[in-house]
Image (spheres, helix red, strand yellow):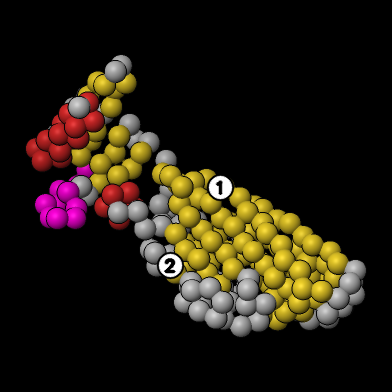
Amino acid sequence: MKKILFLFLLFCIIKEGYSADIDIEGATFEPTYTGAATYSTTVIIDTCTINKQMNFTQDKFIKPNVGCLVGLDSAQTILNNTLTSIKFLNNATSVRTAYDLGSDWSNATSSFTVPCDGYYDISMNLSADLDTATSNFNCYIYLNGVDIASTYFYTTSVSIESVNVGTIYKCSAGDLIAFKVYQVSGGAKNLSSYSYATIWLLGVY
């Protein structure tokens, strides 16, 4: 009942275009209307801020659509002793069917543009064909050109290796997320098309 009352009062505030305090069990909220309300079957709120901490927006909160799975359609060659951006695609189909719910991943720049402030689950799974007995792969998640998570794998035998790296990170709108790899084996190596990455918005702030 209290939730229904809160939503009703919030709707009234948006409709009339004013601010008010709402007290629910001792917690005070201060909804402030900041944009024109749209009356339709899908959107009734444009933008509303509660205590300047939680943002309700029509495309990122009411209809959550921030997330992607990107992959490779074919093997990518990684040169020796060279930090290399992984050319993930949001339309890859060879192994996993990629998707990009909010069209936030760019195939051209191999990066994800953060659409709104929030906490993001970022992870990558790499599969590499190591045809040299001694190989060392370093895998990185980058935010705005800075390494925020990394791992590595080392092998002394000819094999196909897989490695995972992931983090939950507080990001701001406009930040760029990218995935990179660096290997030292004495020659070029291939990432297989089984490699992929995922990015999901867990919550706004």
Label number found at residue 26: none
Q: Is residue 84 left or right of residue 32?
A: right
Mark 1 residue type: Tyr
Q: Which residue is mark 2?
A: 100
Tell me the magenta residue range: 34-44
Tell me the distance, in whole angstroms, between the alpha carbons under discs 1 and 2: 19 Å
Q: In this orientation, does residue 125 appear?
A: yes
Quarter of the picture containing the N terminus is top left
For the residues bearing labels 1 and 2, Cβ distance under 8 angstroms: no
Q: Predominant secondary structure in magenta?
A: loop
- At 57% from the left and 47% from the top, the residue drawn is 168
Q: Amino acid at mark 2?
A: Asp
Does the magenta-highlighted stretch encompass residue 181? no
Q: How many marks?
A: 2
- Any mark on residue 169, and which? 1
Q: Position of residue 64 (x, y in %)?
A: 35, 53
**Image quarter hosting the C terminus:** top left
Give the crowd class for mark 2: few <14, some 14-19, many >=20 residues within 10 Å: many
- Circle 2: element type: strand
Q: Is residue 40 magenta?
A: yes
For the point 12% across and 55% down, the residue is 40
Residue at the outermost left position = 16
Seen in the picture, residue 200 relative to 55 is either above or below; the reply is below
